Amino acid sequence: MLYVYAYLCWACAGCVSGAGRYAEGVSNMAANSGVFEPRNILVTGGCGFIGANFVRYVARNHPDVHVTVLDKLTYAGNPENIAGLPESRVELVVGDICDAALLERVVPGHDAIVHFAAESHNDNSIADPEPFIRTNVEGTMRLLEAARKYDVRFHHISTDEVYGDLALDDPARFSECSPYRPSSPYSASKAASDHLVRAWVRTYGLRATISNCSNNYGPYQHVEKFIPRQITSILEGIRPKLYGTGENVRDWIHTEDHSSAVWEILTRGRIGETYLIGANGEMSNIAVLRMILRLMGQPEDAFDWTRDRPGHDRRYAIDASKLHAELGWKPMHTNFESGLRATIDWYTNHREWWVASKAATEARYRAQGM
Ligand code: NAD
Ligand code: DAU
């Protein structure tokens, strides 16, 4: 894989700016099919958890597509997440989505931007909201401006958290019509970014779509998040930590299913539309933790309760019927327990990938009493 350290190397601007890709000719709608067939996509945040899994998905399933990853490599980004992919098809540009001058060099020549880059962790946003507003709001605006200037198709990755939460005993689920009611600085910043995308569609005619997905799990997820935190704690002999009552419900989806849904929306979704992505994976945190403990051969009560997250959302649940009906998308990973077992195996076999960040993350959590 080719690394282009854009902020260090102006000489690389030629390859970064995609002159070669222009020469090959950008793709558009396949003749008469109504399917958008991108050839050169820019994936922001492609060294993070979901972005990297998406880059791997595209490299595996669409060998005719060239991917440029634009990633700042924050604490959450790791070039190892996309290591081993063919250099001719995957290129890494290290840089900030808030850097308008860099976007001027990187964006031209791409026919689509798939925008994953974000500050993504609720607990961090509660401790310090500022980077969330900068990356998630300002960064999205910068990308939208570049996409508008160069007429690039835009797909925005968002979250179900923009809709706030549901009561535990409420049979309702989120749909594309649910009102925006974000609870945390993180989800408020994502809600703001969704509004920006809609405004750019309506005001400037930008060719954009939005997807709001539920909680992802799978390989390469940072150890600050619930499932990898608990797995790696057990592997390190640390007792897992459960916030509050543990009754909060999340709607789990394997990250590979998120990738396939995003690809369908990018290539066949209707411009200006929002699609919710979910896989009917509702489960309480305490049930997930007990499943992890059981699968790892531990007693099901071998964990500690901690103080609750302020403003902790109670329940998320996705109604993905629009995505099913319009695009025929279906998740492949329908057995959560077997997906969890594979995820446990992945962390067990990739200790070198997480061990350094584990120590730093647990120190941060300890300081917050979590
Ligand atoms: P992550 O924190 O694992 O990765 C974020 C990536 O973005 C990292 O590689 C980081 O280096 C990069 N990044 C951060 N700031 C940047 C900047 N200013 N410029 C360039 N790159 C920058 O996040 P994730 O869990 O993979 O989430 C990816 C996206 O999916 C986010 O937009 C998030 O809101 C959304 N999402 C996440 C989930 C989930 O369960 N994790 C669910 C639904 C939606
Ligand atoms: O719903 C989609 C969202 O899912 C994404 O937009 C976010 O980027 C992603 O981080 C995730 O948000 P959550 O806050 O739901 O995920 P997190 O992994 O932080 O926590 C999941 C649940 O587990 C939540 O109810 C808090 C709880 N929790 C978390 C940790 C880290 C614990 O009980 N103990 C923990 O140690």
Image: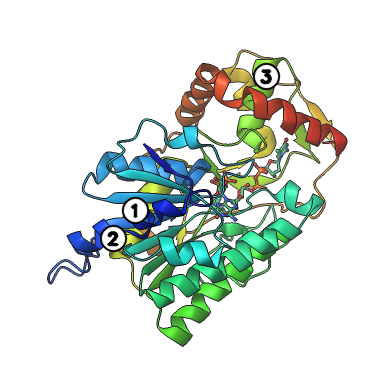
Give me the residue at 39% from left, 56% from top.
Answer: 42
Asked which quadrant contains residue 112, the reply is: bottom left
**Residue 234 shows which numbered tag?**
3
Q: Is residue 222 left or right of residue 20?
A: right
Q: Is mark 3 within 8 Å of ligand 2?
A: no
Number of numbered callouts drawn: 3
Q: Is residue 184 left or right of residue 271?
A: right
> In the figure, 303 relative to 191: above or below?
above
- Quadrant (top left/top right/bottom left/bottom right) for the N terminus: top left
Question: Residue 321's x, y, as percent?
Answer: 41, 61
**Residue 317 shows which numbered tag?**
none
Give me the residue at 61% from left, 31% from top.
Answer: 228
The residue mark sitting in front, 1 or 3, is: 1
Structural crowding at the residue carrying mark 2, measured as other residues with C-alpha within 10 Å and reported as few (<14), some (14–19) or many (≥20)? some
**Residue 15 shows which numbered tag?**
1
Residue 285 is at least partly visible in this image: yes
Helix, strand or loop status at disc 3:
helix
Residue at mark 2 to residue at mark 3: CA–CA distance? 49 Å
Q: Amino acid at mark 3?
A: Ile
Residue at mark 1 to residue at mark 3: CA–CA distance? 45 Å
Structural crowding at the residue carrying mark 3, measured as other residues with C-alpha within 10 Å and reported as few (<14), some (14–19) or many (≥20)? some
Q: Nearer the viewer, residue 148 or 177?
A: 148
Helix, strand or loop status at disc 2:
helix
| Residues at circles 1 and 3 in contact by the CB criterion of under 8 Å | no
Q: Earlier in the sequence, mark 2 or mark 3?
A: 2
> In the figure, 199 relative to 333: above or below?
below
- Provide the residue designation for mark 2: 19
Residue at mark 2 to residue at mark 1: CA–CA distance? 6 Å
Structural crowding at the residue carrying mark 1, measured as other residues with C-alpha within 10 Å and reported as few (<14), some (14–19) or many (≥20)? some
